[in-house]
Amino acid sequence: MSEPTNDTIAPEDVPVADSGTESAEGAVTKDWEAEANRWKELSRKNEAAAKDARSALAELQGVTLRAEVARAAGLPVEMSDRLRGSSEAELVEDAAALVELMAPKAPGLPAIPGVGRGASSDIGSAPTDPLRALTDQQQRGGR
């Protein structure tokens, strides 16, 4: 008989109902219904332990896959828990999007149409940039 592990329950750990009855000749007969119930209980407990083990394995495989995808995308492994998806392809797509979001942006702000230099609304009106207004004032000689 093998040694029981933490994840399984040994048959001897399952309580025995009535182990049998004594016949007229003094021989013990086994109560097969009690024996069957004992094995059913053992089976149910081991099925629950197996289900828990499969769940833990699936979780660890997901963590490992996210870490591998993060590393392949150039992300720090610490960022792997931020990846979302149920398949490797979805994780790769999400990692690429995350890398794009984390990429350094070019200096400067984007131009807003109608505001700033060269905008048609600036013609004949005061400049909207305070530094430009100061420079224009200095050029006119009015310090």
Image: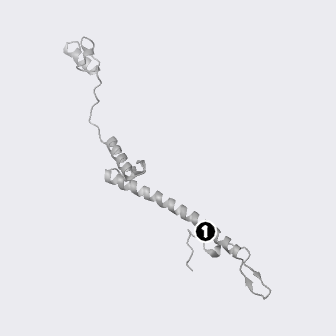
Residue 47: percent from the left, percent from the top?
57, 65
Q: Quadrant of residue 97?
A: top left
Q: Is residue 24 left or right of residue 80?
A: right
Which class describes the residues within 10 Å of circle 1: few (<14), some (14-19), or many (20+)? some
Q: Is residue 10 left or right of residue 100?
A: right
Q: Is residue 80 left or right of residue 43?
A: left
Q: Nearer the viewer, residue 115 or 127?
A: 115
28 relative to 66, above or below: below
Residue at the spot x=27%, y=15% of the render? 121
Q: Which residue is mark 1?
A: 43
Question: What residue type is disc 1 on?
Answer: Ser
Residue 87: percent from the left, percent from the top?
40, 52
Image label count: 1
Residue at the spot x=26%, y=17% of the render? 133
Residue 31: percent from the left, percent from the top?
72, 77
Under tag 1, what secondary structure? helix
Residue 45: percent from the left, percent from the top?
61, 66
